[in-house]
Image (spheres, grey):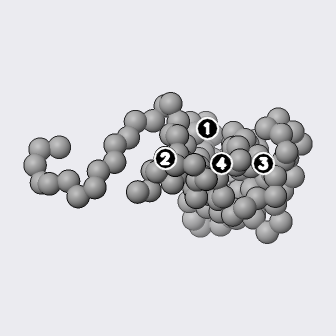
Amino acid sequence: MLLDDTKITVEAPTVTGTTTIDSTAYDMAGFAEIVFIVRLGSPAANNNIRARQDVASGGAFADLQGTLVGSATLNQQMVSVSRPGKQFVRCRVTRGTTTTIDAIIVIQTRARTRPAVQPATAIFETWVGPPEGTA
């Protein structure tokens, strides 16, 4: 089951602007992989995302080589990092052209301990082969 092995966090949207925005720092101690999915309000050649890491959640994060993702025409950008070298990973969204950040969805997967604990702000259910009927 996906949610047994995966923690999914959705960060709040960001108002329109040209500032650089960093996601929350995610602790990877219990996970092997992290995926950032960012939906921008409008695509532009100078809007992009990248993954960054550090040993502490409030440290001086450094870019991870080769993780820069950007498109002049597509507003959904994704980057995946498997087995990062440091414990904390976050996503940096660079907005060179005015746009909103509609969502940053963070998927931490391949949990070492199952089931993965979901954020307190989320509600979910998992079912195996449920019969047809009233939901």
Q: Look at the numbered discs 3 and 2 and tell me whether their residues touch, using CB distance below 8 Å.
A: no
**x, y (%) of residue 44?**
66, 60
- Residue at the spot x=71%, y=56% of the render? 49
Residues at marks 2 and 1 touching, judged by CB atoms closer than 8 Å: no
Q: Which label was assigned to residue 62? A: none
10 Å crowding of disc 1: few (<14), some (14-19), many (20+): some
Mark number for residue 30? 4
Q: CA distance from mark 3 to mark 2?
A: 20 Å
Q: CA distance from mark 3 to mark 4?
A: 9 Å
Tell me the amino acid under the disc marked 1. Answer: Thr
Residues under labels 2 and 4: Cα distance? Answer: 11 Å
Name which quarter of the figure residue 109 lies in.
bottom right
Vertical position of residue 132 compared to residue 121: above or below: below
Earlier-in-chain disc, 3 versus 4: 4
Residue 115 marker:
2
Element carrying mark 3: loop
**Left or right: where does residue 127 sit relative to residue 31?**
left
Comes first in the chain, label 3 or label 1: 1
Residue 75 visible within the image? no
Circle 3 sits on which residue? 87
Residue that protrudes farthest toward the front in the picture: 113
Q: Label 1, on which residue?
A: 14
Place of residue 135 in the rendered image (x, y in percent of width and height, measured from the top left): 17, 43
Picture quarter containing residue 69?
A: bottom right
Q: CA distance from mark 2 to mark 1?
A: 31 Å
Q: Secondary structure at mark 2?
A: loop
Residue plotted at (61% across, 36% down): 15
Residue lying at 81% horizontally and 52% vertically, measured from the top left:
86
Looking at the image, is mark 3 or mark 4 nearer the viewer? 4
Quadrant of image for the N terminus: bottom left
